Image (tube, rainbow, N blue to C red):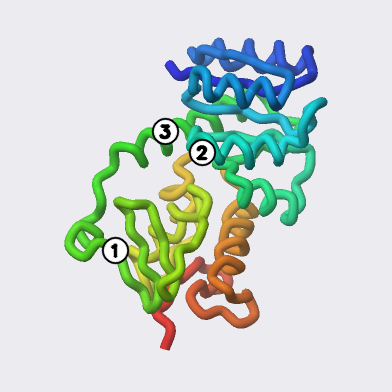
Amino acid sequence: MASVLLVEDDPVIRARLIDVLSRHDHVVRSSPYGFEALREVTRQPPDAVVLDLGLPDLDGVDVLRMLRSISQVPVLVATARDDEAEIIRLLNAGADDYLVKPFSGGQLAARLGAVLRRSATAERAPAPAAARREGAIRVGGLAVDRQARSVFLDGSELRLTRREFDLLAYLAERADRVVPRRRLLADVWRQPYVEEQTLDVHVSSLRRKLGERASRPRYLHTVRGVGIKLVTPR
């Protein structure tokens, strides 16, 4: 059983989602306003937040950024847009996952359950042997520290979302090997319903933060029709 804060201003949709989440054994609190939701998180932190972007008092992305400044609670965003620029904006603002409207109650429950499982796993997972011995996994100028959940590139720390870190760390542990796309979706996302576009968006965002482009990759290489490879630059 998890406590969930639902931030949704439409009373009909809010009632439906409360019913869905309650039937999946979650304890649900709700708010139609961004400012009120931020106060709720500081007053009584939930296990997860489901955040609609179309709020009457604040833009949902602003709520997400402010939320990230005070808490690392997992956030599942509901958005009506599915273009890459919007998704990248959400992920960079700190979203752990997103759902494109309209979505079913079952899809919401599955995505939220996966977000909660990943959060619980990240909190209790021990660092891998390479990280425990050396403090970080090193690939060229990259240093990925599982235990500290930090990434440095040529001595400068990168600000990554939780999912970006998980993806980069997974690839770093398998450096110079091609990892199939479906394996990445299964092992990093760990949920039954994930669109391949989700992986593309995260890879694109990581490339930008690594200072490279798909046409001229340095670390992240796409092997067409196969998967993704994090390589040691020559």
> Label 3 sits on what residue type?
Arg
Residue closest to the eye, 148 or 48: 148
> Label 1 sits on what residue type?
Ala
- Measured in 3D between alpha carbons, the distance from the residue under mark 3 to the one under mark 2, in whole angstroms, is 13 Å
Could you tell me how many numbered marks the image carries?
Answer: 3
The quarter of the displayed image where residue 63 is located:
top right
x%, y% of residue 17?
66, 17
x%, y% of residue 190?
45, 42
Category of crowding for the residue at label 3, using alpha-carbon neighbours closer than 10 angstroms: few (below 14), some (14–19), many (at least 20): some
Q: Which residue is drawn at 78% across and 13% down?
A: 11
| Side (left or right) of 142 relative to 193 | left
**Labelled disc at residue 136:** 1
The quarter of the picture where the N terminus appears is top left
**Labelled disc at residue 192:** 2
- Residue 19, above or below 76: above
Give the secondary structure at mark 2: loop
Q: Residue at x 63, y 10 (%)?
A: 19
Callout 1–callout 3 Cβ contact below 8 Å: no
Give the secondary structure at mark 3: helix
x%, y% of residue 68?
56, 40
- The mark closer to the camera, 2 or 1, is 1
Q: Which of marks 3 and 2 is nearer the N terminus?
A: 3
- Measured in 3D between alpha carbons, the distance from the residue under mark 1 to the one under mark 3, in whole angstroms, is 24 Å
> Label 2 sits on what residue type?
Pro
Q: Residue at x 77, y 36 (%)?
A: 59
- The residue identified by callout 3 is 117
The quarter of the displayed image where residue 84 is located:
bottom right
